[in-house]
Amino acid sequence: KQEVTQIPAALSVPEGENLVLNCSFTDSAIYNLQWFRQDPGKGLTSLLLIQSSQREQTSGRLNASLDKSSGRSTLYIAASQPGDSATYLCAVGNRDDKIIFGKGTRLHILP
Amino acid sequence: NAGVMQNPRHLVRRRGQEARLRCSPMKGHSHVYWYRQLPEEGLKFMVYLQKENIIDESGMPKERFSAEFPKEGPSILRIQQVVRGDSAAYFCASSLQGQLYEQYFGPGTRLTVT
C-alpha cells in the first residue's frame, strides 16, 4: 500500500532564504508526482507535475526533483518570499490509478 | 475559462440532516473526483465519476454517502444523516482525461456538523 510522507510537518524560514521540502513514498512504481500549494481555507493549486520518466520540473523559483528508485521528491524554493507561506502537498499518482496525498508541510516565511 | 466551482463554500448541518455538496468541473472536463480532508490529515480520495457513471468509489464510506454526475448539471456529493465525524473540507477536482492526468481543484466546501 502506497504511503506518502512529508517532512517536516512545519517549517519557518526567514525571507530570502532558499529552502527544500521533502516527500517520500513507499512504492516506487508510480505514474507521476505532483506538488500542490494550499492556502488556509482555500483549495489546491497545482505547482509542478513530474512524470515518472522525468527527473525534475522547474517553474520560476520552484524546482521539483524526482528520484523514483529511492522513493523521494524534493521541492526547492529559491529566494523565499512572505507570499510563499502556505501548506505544500505532495501527491503521488499510483499505478492503481489512485492519487495518494501526503499530509503536507506548513511553510511560514518570516518577513 | 472558469475553474472548478464548488458550492456552498461553507455548510452547517445538525446531526441527522442531509448535506448536498455541488461541483461544476472546468469547461470541457468530464472527469470529476471528490476528496475529503479531515483536520490535520491529508486529502483522501473518495470517488471518481464520469458523466452518468461512477468509475471508482473505493474511497467512499459504505453507508450514508453517495455521489452522482448527471448528464446535465453539476456533480453532487450527498451525505445522509450527517454525524460530527463528517465535519471536514470536501474538495472536488476535474481533469480532461483520467485520474493520472493533471487535476484541477475547486475551493472546497467546509462542512460543519453541530
Image (cartoon, helix red, strand yellow):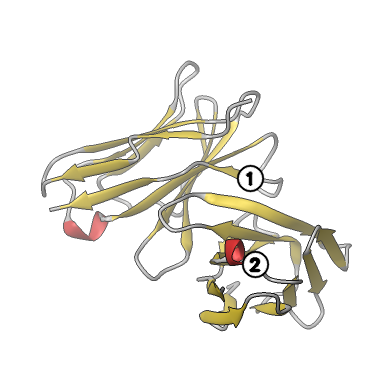
Q: Is residue A70 above or below residue B85?
A: below
For the residue marked with disc 1, what is the amino acid? Answer: Gln
Q: Secondary structure at mark 2?
A: loop
Amino acid of disc 2: Gln
Using residue B62 as the reference point, say whether residue A109 is left or right of it. Answer: right
Marked residue chain, label 2: A
Asked if residue A2 lies left or right of residue B68, the reply is right
Assign the N terminus of chain B to one quadrant of the image: top right
Out of A31 and A83, give the one closest to the viewer: A83
The residue located at (60%, 56%) in the rendering is A98
Specify the quadrant of the image occupied by residue B105. Answer: top right
**Looking at the image, which residue sits at the far front?**
A111
Q: What residue did someone put label 1 on?
A: B103
Specify the quadrant of the image occupied by residue A36: bottom right
Answer with left or right where residue B68 lies relative to residue B31: left
Residue at left 88%, top 68%? A55
Residue drawn at (55%, 81%) of the image: A11
Splitting the image into 4 quarters, where does residue B39 fall?
Answer: bottom left
Q: Secondary structure at mark 1?
A: loop
Q: In this image, A73 relative to B9: left or right?
A: right
Q: Which mark is residue A82?
A: none
**Residue A16 appears at what percent x and percent y?**
70, 75
Within 10 Å of disc 1 (Cα), the crowding (few <14, some 14-19, many 20+) is: many
Judging by the rendered image, the residue that carries numbered circle 2 is A81
Task: Find the residue positioned furthest to the top.
Answer: B72
Q: Position of residue A103 (x, y in %)?
A: 50, 71
Q: Nearer the viewer, mark 1 or mark 2?
A: 2
**Could you say where residue A85 lies in the image, as x and y percent from the top left?**
55, 66
| Chain of the residue where label 1 is placed in the rendered structure | B
